[in-house]
Amino acid sequence: MEKVGIVGYYQIKPETDIQMSRPEMIFYATRGALDHAGLKRDDLTTVISATNDYYDGKTISNCFTVDAGGAYLKDESKVEMDGAHAVNYGLMRCLSGHHKLALVWGASQPSTFYYSCIRVLENDPTFDRPINLLNDYTAAALGMRAYMNKFGVSVEDIAKVGVKNHKNAAKNPLAWNEAQLPEITVEDVLNSEMLSDPVTKLMHAMPCDGATALILAPEELAKKIIDDPVWITGVGLCQETYYLGDRDLSISVSMEKAAQKAYKMARINDPRKDIDVVELFEHSAYEELILAEALGLCEKGKGSSLSSEINGEIPINPSGGNIGAFTPCATGITRIIEAVKQIQGEAKGYQVKDANRAIAHGQIGFCAQNNIVYILEGGKK
Amino acid sequence: MGVQPVIVSAGFSEHASKRSDVNMAELMNEAIEDALNKCNCTIDDIDCIINGNMPAFEGANIPELWMTDHIGAKNKPFLRVTTGGTTGGSVAIAAYYAVASGLYDTVLATSFEQQSCGSTTVGLSSVALGEVSIYLELGYDFEKLRRNMGAGAAIGIAAYQAVNYMRRSHCTEEDLARVVVQNRHNAAKNWWTHLKMPNYTIEQVLDTPYISYPLRFGMVTPASDGSCAMIYTTEENAKKFTDTPVYVNGVASVSNETAIVTSEAGGCGQIDPCEQLGARISARLAYEQAGISFPEKEIDYVEVYSPFPNQELMWLERLGLFEENTAHLQYREGVTALDGDLPVNCSGGVNSTNAIGASAMERVAEAALQIMGKAGNQSPKEIHTAIGHGWGGAINLITLSILADQPRRKYKGGI
């Protein structure tokens, strides 16, 4: 694969109830990314958006954000999945040789809808939906229980992931205010509101309003735009079966397959040694452990003993991850941006030392049904 | 840089107003099997699946998640692309880029719509009226709002567009009826279509009541259930699957502002919805990629997305195939008929069959089959270059694919 560089990005500070309309929020994110890269809208050749009509409460919501998203009279399309999937489409457009600069943005305003209710519409409409037992929380509970039972992991071990991510979020100025908890303890996590046994509120990602955007450019052009572009050297995408009963929820088959493809593309043999920092999209704390194991960073079931703090062996989610700020449709792009910041040394307050190669991840579906993995590399070393 | 993508197969399901014999996944499966069987391909040969449909019409969000096993997506890369009416065209373009980028070799592009599962009218009305609560909060008068935004959903906006077009071109209602009759006659000869009316006449069309002037009940598109699937691959791989590969030489999907007063009433909107700047720029881009300088001479076959007859006339002009305001004259002379100089919508078009999410892809699929010589209603003329077009959103989204039986002439990606 030819290299494609990330030359600019911008994140809106996520908020519980943002005082902006949706197009306004999108405009600030896309304009911010253009300003960050020192480009003008005229330089763009294509725009890919990540939104969801159900989240926006509007059919064909993307036709009203053409102008706000910078796509007026530009070659434009929309991916109705996570932002990370939209980046994959932007990447495909850059690699095809037809496009020079691709702007990718994602946005949603969960303050205007009940996220976990809307997600019930993702259920199989003939069986799961009428029974109405499967939702965001219960799916996480089933997954967490399966993981704990299979590997003998305790609730405390999983709560620790919540503690780490909330503490990391406190250091990240662009994390969600309500998730920035510097003094949090394992007891706090376990004693917070029970969503669905054993998942408690502080170990689950809670949605908030936000928008993010980034700009992709092919190798030659990227070098002209900025001095230290971060390169996408590998990408892997995989979807596994839907029915939770057909899956072993204690492992992630799709993540393994996606990671293998991305590693092969980026020529990574030993991820433990070669990867400096990891940004994962975890809906719930236990997912971070399963996903890290599927990435080959540790043995199956040993995720909780991995040293994943900011100054640890393999830092995972130094930004606070998805628990630190979960903006549906935008969060996959945020993960990529946070990994880029680490590589460029711009993550002030939560910088990982000498980070040059990172993993960023996006997902969609209950219990991480569809996963996408990016390998990002800087120019150091 | 970049790989030349090739279409090797296209398949359809049976279309009808109610396909209650199948569910969404089974409906999709029909088209996928048809596409795979036509080119000796199995689902194991597929490296990536891209799908789309109108999100709101079935009341199912990202239905591909639970359809995974039924559409063969298990343990494969999967992307969902949706852009309203252009969804099918956008999926086809995404499949093009998936192959062109070199990331995937063989890509299955699918799209479907089962409108009998939900309510299309409810889905569509939220296109026009979704932001009403915001306007009311701002103190906007509801009467004013209705006048400004009432032209939102399909028929409202099409009627508005039709009046504008008739004013420009001086075409008559009879001309609109002629377009409909041609489409329905064509549909009768194609196996998968919905409204098959071999004996429909202009008088019968003009005898039906108005839905919204100048569009009559007999002129408008039906609501169908159906699906479409296509297989894109590299030139090298295509040899395995077929003797008649169709090269995709140009794609474009340039978007304009929404045709109503824009989302926040801050923009100017498109004053004239039949101006279609987005379509003109899309056409220029795609023709440039395909190395076509004289579309009116070089293109042999056209599939345009025209739920309403005035749009068929308008798109043919905006895409540079006829002089401005003359398309209806060409229809009078039979230029666009099955055996004419420039056959248009021999499949019966969207006017006869409209499974919305799939419609724009069916245009590309039928254009490809005409080049292969395998279409249900094959034109007697030899087809070398063909267009598959789509429109969607608030008539501001456009998709365009240019297909040919020869690879593109040295396109190097511009300057």
Image (cartoon, coloured by chain):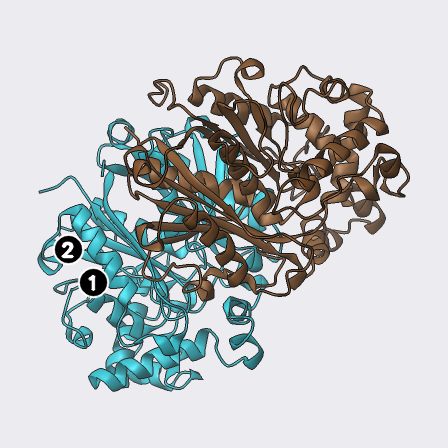
Chain colours: A cyan, B brown
| Residue for point 34% across, 30% down | B4
Residue B50 left/right relative to A230:
right
Q: Amino acid at mark 1?
A: Leu
Which quadrant holds the C terminus of chain A?
top left
Give me the disc on residue B74: none
Tell me the subunit letter for badge 2: A
Looking at the picture, tell me which residue is in the foreground, B339 or A293: B339
Task: Respond whether the residues carrying marks 2 and 1 are from the same subunit.
Answer: yes
Q: Amino acid at mark 2?
A: Ile
Residue ID for mark 1: A295
- Callout 2 touching callout 1 (CB < 8 Å): yes
Q: Is residue A52 above or below residue A192?
A: above
Looking at the picture, tell me which residue is in the foreground, B114 or A251: B114
| Residue for point 59% across, 51% down | A21
Circle 1 SS class:
loop
Residue A234 left/right relative to A217:
left
Residue B354 left/right relative to A162:
right
Q: Position of residue A343 (x, y in %)?
A: 21, 47
Looking at the picture, tell me which residue is in the foreground, A177 or B178: B178
Q: Position of residue A335 (x, y in %)?
A: 32, 55
Residue A29 left/right relative to A114:
left
In terms of image quadrants, where is residue A6?
top left
